[in-house]
Image (spheres, rainbow, N blue to C red):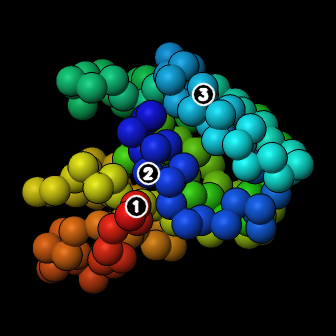
Amino acid sequence: SSGINAEYGSSKIPSVNYSPRHYIVADTDTMSQNKIEQFEKDRMSGATVVISKIPRAREVGQSYVSSVLTTLYSQLLCVPHVLCARPDVLLVNGPGTCIPVCVMVFVLRVLGLCKGRIIYVESICRVKTVSLSAKILVWFADHVLVQWPHLAEGNSRCRYIGRLVS
């Protein structure tokens, strides 16, 4: 989502150290694509940058039952993008769009086809509870990072990192 892109864009992540960069966004999320393009233009790092689009795994307010089909569809369409990228590190955030990508990277890692360390950063907007994405990824992501201390309490798989954005 574009709010998450703002968090990453203003963070101190040294993007120059990570190239090529492959972004995967929801096909209906033009705002995020525009922010990514601007972020990369401002960095002028000369890195190879690819932006791919996949369908949303789950729309806001969509029932869990119907989201199974849309998630499977999104999973199918993310396969060529992940196979092409074969990431060493996958940095993802809250929207459900990240789940199919994470599952695919995890499968490739189990098969020995990529290093694929999965780092999930919960949005700073998640103040009271962790998202459904975090509840799923806690089972197979390498790191689940939260920005509020009480979200890590009682869950040994979540790690409080403080505010990512200053």
Q: Quadrant of residue 82?
A: top right
Q: The residue under label 2 is which amino acid type?
A: Glu
Identify which residue, 131 or 146, lies in the foreground: 146
Q: Using the numbered discs, state the Cα–Cα distance from disc 3 to disc 1 in whole angstroms.
A: 20 Å
Farthest residue toward the left?
Answer: 128
Q: What percent of the width, then of the height, locates residue 157? A: 33, 77
Q: Is residue 143 visible?
A: yes
- Where disc 1 sits, the SS reads loop
Q: What percent of the width, then of the height, locates residue 2? A: 44, 34
- Which circle's residue, 3 or 1, is located before the other in the chain? 3
- Which circle's residue, 1 or 2, is located before the other in the chain? 2
Q: The residue under label 1 is which amino acid type?
A: Val
- Where disc 2 sits, the SS reads helix
On the rendered structure, is 37 left or right of 48? left
Residue at which label 3 appears: 33
Of circles 3 and 1, the one toward us is 1
In the picture, the quarter occupied by the C terminus is bottom left
On the rendered structure, is 12 left or right of 80? left
Within 10 Å of disc 1 (Cα), the crowding (few <14, some 14-19, many 20+) is few
Residue at which label 2 appears: 7
Q: Quadrant of residue 156?
A: bottom left
> Residue shown at 22%/68% (left/top)?
148
Residue at which label 1 appears: 165
Identify which residue, 148 or 110, lies in the foreground: 148
**Is there CB contact under 8 Å for labels 1 and 2?**
yes
Q: On residue 17, which mark appears?
A: none
Q: Using the numbered discs, state the Cα–Cα distance from disc 2 to disc 3 in whole angstroms.
A: 14 Å
The correct choice, above or below, for 93 with respect to 164 in the image is above
